[in-house]
Image (tube, rainbow, N blue to C red):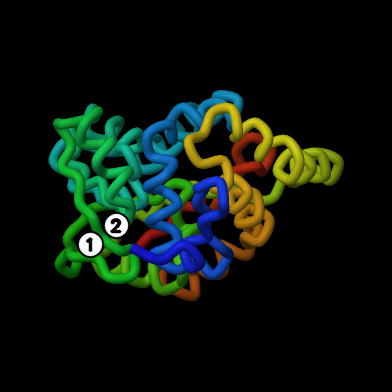
Amino acid sequence: MPDADSAGIDGAGSTRATLDKRHGEIAAMFDRVAARYDLANDVLSLGQDRAWRREVVQAVAPRPGQLILDMAAGTGTSSEPFAERGATVIPTDLSLGMLLIGKQRRPGLSFVAADALQLPYADASFDAVTISFGLRNVEDAAAALTEMRRVIKPGGALVVCEFSTPTWTPFRTLYSNYLVAALPRIATLVSSNPAAYEYLAESIQAWPDQQGLATVIEQCGWRDVEWRNLSGGIVALHRARS
């Protein structure tokens, strides 16, 4: 585990990563939020996270017999719907704390601890790969997208659900104010590690917009890249083929 300085542990014992997104920082931060992560997401998104997950499932269109890689799966909330549709899903995450909670709550899923930059899977193994609200936390997003392309079968689908840039300027300003002022305050009430949500706000604001992410995906060798805005562009759903 990283020491207090590298992990960003403040005097109150809260853990947050920096925008350098070093592996140890990210893992330590998510370990600390694991116990109340799903609850915090529901509260902070005003319940919109459920609708976003449904959109991801529709975009992946899982079928019985398919093998799906769910990256940054956390506690398995995003993975469960794929299994319910009859597909075999492999929830994969860097945080051991998140995986432990996931195994306790969803014992029917086969969780795997792995780094997005060095996946422990053979070439062309999966029919689809998806990552929801996790690509933004990877140290090298382009390298992760390239690694995901390595493990997917030819013609397989990539679905990325990630925070993005609201398209309407007044709403974009309002949303930015929410990230900076309101979100960290609400997080103190519902999260076991409120400092992590300061990083959340910063990482969202530093993340590429819809076209910017589409360009990165294309540069990593994916084809037929397209996106659709959700909740006015707060979130964007990108889809591509290998």
Residue neighbourhood size for the residue with mark 1, other residues' Cα within 10 Å, grouped as few (<14), some (14–19), many (≥20):
some
**Camera-side residue: 192 or 62?**
192
Residue that mark 2 sits on? 156
Residue 155: image quadrant is bottom left
* 100 sits to left or right of 134: left
Q: Position of residue 39 (x, y in %)?
A: 46, 27
**Camera-side residue: 36 or 131?**
36
- Which quadrant, please, contains the C terminus? bottom left
Q: CA distance from mark 2 to mark 1?
A: 5 Å
Residue that mark 1 sits on? 153
Q: Residue at x 24, y 41 (%)?
A: 100
Q: Residue at x 20, y 45 (%)?
A: 111
Q: Are marks 2 and 1 in contact (CB under 8 Å)?
A: yes
Q: Secondary structure at mark 1?
A: strand
Residue found at the far front of this picture:
11
Note whether residue 224 is visible.
Answer: no
- Which quadrant, please, contains the N terminus? bottom left
Q: Position of residue 181 (x, y in %)?
A: 76, 40
**Camera-side residue: 85 or 187?**
187
